[in-house]
Image (cartoon, rainbow, N blue to C red):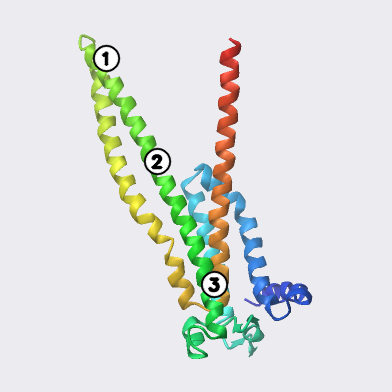
Amino acid sequence: MSVFIDLVAVLGRLLEPVLDESATAAAIVLFTVLVRLALHPLSRAAFRGATPVAGILPVLLQLPVFFLMYRAFSSAEIGGGANELLGHRLFAAPLGDRWTEALGEGGLFGERGLVFLGLFAVVAVVAAWSAARARKTAALMAATAAASATAAATVRGKAAKGKASGAKASGAKAAGAAVALTAEQQELMRKVGGVLPLLSFGTLITAAVVPLAAGLYLVTTTAWSVAERAWLQYRKDRAERAEGAVSGAERSAM
């Protein structure tokens, strides 16, 4: 933990001439960005679906960092000495404060309470953005499944017309199974599309019960995840459009 605290302290001192007492809060955000930059290759591999493990590793590797952040701003003593980080603030709110403590020091609209309300507003915006993208992804997957079902039904119809051929009859049966499987996939996608976006707002509950510093880490890494996935999807779509344009040009040339 001491290495983590030293790194945050160094970043805070570098930012202090510009941000004054909020320098440590900004250092936490900067530290989070550095962590996510280090994990970006894994996130990119997870987006491409390289391996099942690739999708889990970025989350698992962040858990120790989050717990370090939680402990660093929850412990009164670290290494046998007083925890100096607890004296740092984000505007009027100490970084070790929880929302319940802020409510006890001025109420919902007190100086500390307003800091938490600002944090919750940012969390809500990021959660809404994540939920919108989740719905869009679920709808796209459902549309893809529907297109696959239509294509399979077409193959089945063609195979059914040639019943004289045993191979074609087997193809019809396989196509029918594909349609059934696709229907199940569509139903699953519909259910996931309804539930998954709501999970994005779980971050709001977490931010309300952890120290302010941990909440800053949480909202920064969540915003990074949504923005990173949007950027990777944009690059993928652009590459597919470029590939389609090249293929169209080649067909025209022929």
Residue under the image location 60 percent in, 84 percent down:
94
Tag count: 3
23 shown above or below 39: below
CA distance separating discs 1 and 3? 63 Å
Residue pictured at 49% horizontal, 43% vertical: 49
Q: In x, y percent, where is residue 93?
A: 59, 83
Q: Rounded to the nearest whole Å, what is the CA distance between mark 3 and mark 2?
A: 33 Å
User: Where in the figure is residue 161, as x and y percent of width and height?
Assistant: 23, 12
x and y percentages locating residue 126 in the rendered image: 51, 61
Q: CA distance from mark 2 to mark 1?
A: 31 Å
- Identified at 57% across, 42% down, the residue is 234
Looking at the rendered structure, the kind of residue marked 1 is Ala
* Disc 1 residue crowd, few under 14, some 14–19, many 20+, Cα 10 Å: few
First in residue order: circle 2 vs circle 1: 2
Amino acid carrying mark 3 in the image: Leu
Q: Is residue 97 visible?
A: no
Q: Position of residue 223 (x, y in %)?
A: 55, 60
Q: Quadrant of the N terminus?
A: bottom right
- Give residue 201's quadrant in the image: bottom left
Q: Name the amino acid, label 2.
A: Met
Q: Residues within 10 Å of mark 2 (few under 14, many from 20)?
A: some
Residue 167's disc number: 1
* Numbered disc in front, either 3 or 2: 3
Residue designated by label 3:
119
Residue 146 — which label? Answer: none
Residue marked by disc 2: 141
Residue 202 lies left or right of residue 245; in this view the side is left
